[in-house]
Amino acid sequence: MAAAASTARPCAFCAIVAGDLDAPVVTETEHTVAFLDHSPLFRGHTLVVTRVHVETLRDLPDDLLTPFFTEVRRITAAVQDGLGADGVFVAQNNVVSQSVPHLHVHVVPRRRKDGLRGFFWPRERYADDAEAQEYAARIRSALGRRGRAREPDQTC
């Protein structure tokens, strides 16, 4: 859910967007700002954020979807090419493990044998095909109920 107009703690990413908090900015567009993560997995780890305060991906308005992810794709290519990386890891958290409640995508340069092993959490298996189908049905049901993204409650 988008943040209320008055939050208890100021948003660090809104402060970076506004120029009130220093960060090594990589690039800016009308809708996004990309800057280096202050605690990178690897050097060059870049965050792409929305200029407007949107907390999670589900809150991203439809009119920002294309410009936001177009910029994520552009930054992904630049991180790989500019740093001579073998590839990149692109990740986005919603609420759980989201250290700053402002939509952001991590673009992390990767090199073969860099020590990062797949996903960072244990994997589960479905008990059987019936259980897998039940989970698929629950998600399909939620898709039918889901409306459009909400408008942001505030701007940075």
Image: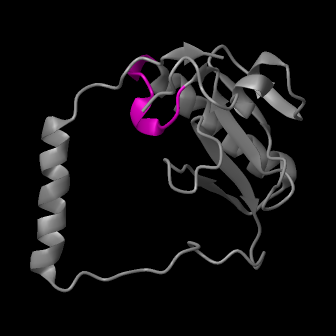
Residue under the point 35% across and 26% down: 149
Task: State the quadrant of the C terminus.
Answer: top right
Horizontally, residue 49 falls left or right of residue 63, namely right
Q: Quadrant of residue 124?
A: bottom left
Horizontally, residue 94 falls left or right of residue 97, namely left
- Residue placed furthest toward the front: 8
Q: Which residues are magenta?
A: 54-63
Residue under the point 78% across and 75% down: 114
Does the magenta run of residues contain 52?
A: no
Does the magenta run of residues contain 61?
A: yes
Where does the image place residue 69, in percent across and percent down from the top left?
54, 33
- Number of marks present in the image shown: 0
Camera-side residue: 99 or 42?
Answer: 99
Residue 42 vertical placement versus 29 (above, below): below
Where does the image place residue 51, in percent across and percent down from the top left?
64, 20
Residue 5 vertical placement versus 138 (above, below): above
Q: Quadrant of residue 50?
A: top right
Camera-side residue: 23 or 78?
Answer: 23
Residue 78 vertical placement versus 40 (above, below): above
Residue 29 vertical placement versus 16 (above, below): above
Question: By what rule are the colours in the image chosen?
Answer: one colour
Residue under the point 47% across and 19% down: 152
Horizontally, residue 87 falls left or right of residue 81, namely left
Task: State the quadrant of the N terminus.
Answer: top left
Where does the image place residue 133, in percent across and percent down from the top left?
12, 69
- Residue placed furthest toward the bottom: 127
Where does the image place residue 57, in percent across and percent down from the top left?
46, 37
